[in-house]
């Protein structure tokens, strides 16, 4: 296994990941943009409903995170047969969980939308979108897992190309829906196009995956290794608990402002849509660094992994802060893509200004958090992240939003404060090298 990775090695892997993540985000942006042409209400309804889908799809993220951490270390140690078993077993588990999640979102779409506290005039659109797009969970679960395997084997370009194709299908279909050329309109038409693009992209990934020579055996799909599966799920749950808590917290904190004017909720949806792009840049750096760091740790090169993640922090910083700054500078044009409301624009500008401060904190999490995951050191960070999100993001966010009367600005203050605390704690753990200490590592491994 090659060691001594440089900045160009991180960028070589991160660029395809970045393009893929940005294009996946673009699919949601296209839907938001298209629906904003219909009305701010339809766009807001779908934006809030997407938070429910994000929580459901976290199950897929958990599984793929656990697989990625273990598979990278196995590949770094040169255990190719074990890697192939992990690949095929993970696809079976992903398919089973995808079927369950699809059934839940379709059957209970009404109850899930009601839980979000949407106004009566928004509920019908939200339920329609959730029922149709929720059916795609199976395909998104399998597609996410396939993308993970391609990245672990250094073929990050493949899922990127597939996402490009998926975006073309989604954008073309959405445009035809908007122009009334398909006989389906509004939220229902946009949701159907999203479902179709997910189905086709997953089918293409499966075809290409079957052509790879990575030691895949069809029999491994039907013979699950219970111990391996439990380990993957345990590592995945602990490594993604931060994201689980954050998205659930987003759902709860959204309820703090659902009673405010529709302009406030629309501004939140548009700002989150816009700010997701600079965030994805930093995440791609972290994910690339995690892959390389996992290979190094699997090969016993812990000191090199430590230097690599530190280097990743400075690279992420160069993406996160300038990205947020550019979003604020071009706020008029970016927000103007979705709405012409001056009230929405003014609220969005204020939130994007706060995001600049938050961006510096995200760089810590976009590097050191992924470094800890690459080492399999996930138990202690999970505990810290859990209390950080619920006490600061939700607790402080509620205090600033409701009792102090700061409205949606209070939510952003809570989020920014929590991001800084969590980022500094992750950086401290990595720099103290607690993940290298034998007894610490053994304790974490025993938990998984």
Image (spheres, rainbow, N blue to C red):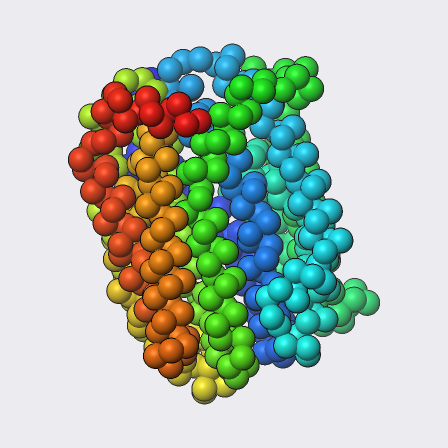
From the viewer's perspective, tell me whether residue 207 is left or right of residue 348.
Answer: right
Residue at 45% across, 32% down: 235
Position of residue 251 measured from the top left corner of the image (x, y, whole percent): 52, 62
Q: Indicate whether 369 appears above or below 113.
A: above
Q: Where is residue 309 in the image (x, y as percent from the top left)?
A: 26, 37
Relative to 67, is 58 above or below? below
Q: Does residue 409 appear to the left or right of 22 in the view shown?
A: left
Q: In which quarter of the image is the C terminus?
A: top left
Asked if residue 431 can be seen in this view, the reply is yes
The x, y position of residue 277, in whole percent, is 42, 58
Q: Residue 404, percent across and down? A: 34, 79
Please report the residue visible at 62 percent of the width from the left and 44 percent of the height from the top: 140
- Direction bottom: furthest residue: 342
Residue shown at 57% from the left, 33% from the top: 146
- In this view, the residue in front, 199 or 404, is 404
Foreground residue among 164 and 357: 357
Residue 367 figure quarter: top left
Extreme left residue here? 432
Placement of the N terminus among the 4 image quadrants: top left
Q: In which quarter of the image is residue 11?
A: top left
């Amino acid at each position: 296994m090659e060691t001594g990775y440089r900045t160009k090695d991180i960028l070589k892997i991160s660029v395809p990941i970045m393009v893929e993540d940005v294009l996946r985000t673009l699919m949601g942006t296209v839907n938001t943009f298209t629906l904003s042409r219909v009305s701010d209400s339809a766009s807001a309804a779908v934006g809030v409903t997407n938070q429910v889908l994000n929580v459901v799809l976290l199950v897929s993220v958990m599984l793929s995170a656990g697989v990625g951490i273990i598979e990278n270390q196995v590949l770094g140690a040169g255990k190719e047969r074990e890697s192939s078993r992990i690949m095929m077993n993970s696809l079976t588990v992903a398919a089973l969980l995808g079927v369950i999640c699809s059934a839940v979102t379709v059957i209970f779409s009404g109850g899930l939308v009601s839980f979000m506290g949407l106004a009566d005039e928004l509920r019908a659109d939200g339920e329609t979108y959730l029922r149709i797009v929720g059916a795609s969970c199976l395909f998104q679960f399998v597609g996410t897992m396939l993308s993970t395997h391609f990245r672990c084997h250094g073929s990050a370009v493949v899922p990127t190309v597939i996402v490009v194709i998926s975006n073309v299908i989604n954008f073309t279909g959405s445009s035809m829906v908007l122009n009334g050329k398909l006989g389906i309109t509004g939220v229902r038409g946009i949701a159907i196009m999203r479902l179709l693009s997910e189905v086709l992209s997953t089918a293409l990934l499966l075809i290409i995956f079957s052509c790879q020579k990575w030691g895949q055996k069809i029999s491994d799909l039907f013979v699950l290794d219970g111990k391996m599966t439990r380990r993957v799920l345990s590592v995945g749950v602990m490594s993604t608990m931060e994201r689980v808590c954050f998205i659930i917290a987003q759902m709860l904190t959204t309820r703090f402002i659902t009673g405010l004017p529709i302009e406030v909720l629309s501004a939140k949806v548009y700002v989150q849509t816009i700010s997701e792009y600079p965030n994805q840049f930093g995440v791609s750096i972290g994910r690339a660094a995690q892959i390389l760091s996992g290979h190094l740790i699997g090969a016993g090169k812990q000191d090199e992994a430590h230097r690599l993640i530190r280097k990743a922090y400075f690279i992420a910083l160069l993406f996160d802060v300038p990205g947020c700054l550019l979003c604020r500078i071009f706020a008029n044009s970016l927000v103007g893509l979705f709405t012409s409301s001056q009230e929405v624009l003014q609220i969005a500008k204020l939130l994007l200004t706060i995001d600049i401060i938050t961006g510096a904190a995200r760089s810590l999490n976009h590097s050191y958090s992924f470094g800890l995951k690459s080492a399999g050191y996930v138990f202690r960070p999970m505990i810290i992240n859990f209390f950080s999100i619920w006490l600061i993001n939700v607790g402080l966010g509620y205090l600033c939003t409701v009792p102090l009367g700061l409205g949606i600005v209070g939510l952003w203050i809570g989020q920014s404060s929590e991001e800084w605390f969590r980022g500094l704690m992750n950086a401290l753990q990595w720099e103290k090298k607690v993940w290298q200490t034998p007894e610490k590592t053994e304790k974490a491994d025993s938990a998984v």
